Image (cartoon, rainbow, N blue to C red):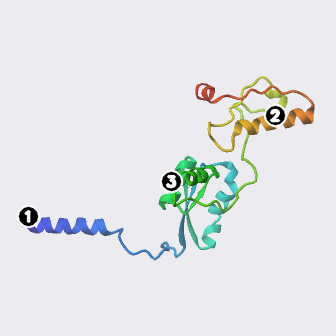
Amino acid sequence: MKKAISILLAAAMGAAALTGCSKSSGSSSSGNTPLVLNEVAHSIFYAPQYAAIELGYFEDEGIDLTLVNGAGADKVMTALISGDAQIGFMGSEASIYVYQEGSQDYAVNFAQLTQRAGNFLVGRQPEDNFKWESLKGKKVLGGRAGGRPNHDVTFEHIREIYEWTSRKALELPVFQYEEKIISAS
């Protein structure tokens, strides 16, 4: 009896283990082509993409899209090269790093999703009538070290445009990386 139960349990475990091992036809249960898109971060800047997903535009085109947040260009590139994702949204720097390492399997940048950086100035308290002058003497957290685009440089560019167009100096110190860790709370 014990031998029969052992054989039955072994067969059941073997069947359960092999459940996911079938020849795939390259399409999902809906008949659409499955596609994994790994994005570097969730951002309001990608709102048109999120709307297209929610409104079913990808499904209308025969694509069963799975959106994954990679949490960094290095992780998006890893998913892309390993085959865990078919498309990776990230800056070009990850492709350059992989290429420079001499990899035979490097990613090719083929599209430009945006023309500008998706930078937003946000504050801790609402300001009904925002003016750039209200930032005088304030510290601004420009972004993370090594991030692309370099938000510190972008903010400095905004400050220079303000000063040029208004003919007024605007003193806006931007955090250095060490200060960001200590002061960003």
Instruction: Name which residue lies at 70% across and 57% down.
Output: 113
Residue neighbourhood size for the residue with mark 1, other residues' Cα within 10 Å, grouped as few (<14), some (14–19), many (≥20): few
Residue furthest out toward the top: 137
Q: Secondary structure at mark 2?
A: helix
Q: CA distance from mark 2 to mark 3?
A: 36 Å
Quadrant for the C terminus, please.
top right
Instruction: Name which residue lies at 64% across and 59% down.
Output: 109
The tag on residue 43 is: none
Quadrant for the N terminus, please.
bottom left
Kindly indicate the quadrant of the structure image that contains residue 77: bottom right
Which tag, 2 or 3, sits closer to the chain's start? Answer: 3
Image marks 2 and 1: residues in contact by CB distance under 8 Å: no
Measuring from the top left, give residue 134's x and y in whole percent: 81, 27
Frontmost residue, 93 versus 133: 93
Kindly indicate the quadrant of the structure image that contains residue 162: top right
The tag on residue 159 is: 2
Left or right? Give the position of 96 relative to 128.
Answer: left
Residue neighbourhood size for the residue with mark 2, other residues' Cα within 10 Å, grouped as few (<14), some (14–19), many (≥20): some
Q: Is residue 143 above or below residue 95?
A: above
- Residue 121: tell me if it is visible: no
Q: Is residue 127 above or below residue 84?
A: above
Q: Secondary structure at mark 1?
A: helix
The tag on residue 2 is: 1
Q: Give the foreground label among 2 and 1.
A: 2
Q: Which residue is mark 3?
A: 78
Disc 2 marks a residue whose amino acid type is Arg
Image marks 1 and 3: residues in contact by CB distance under 8 Å: no
Image marks 2 and 3: residues in contact by CB distance under 8 Å: no
Instruction: Name which residue lies at 72% across and 43% down.
Output: 119
Measuring from the top left, give residue 58's x and y in whole percent: 62, 68
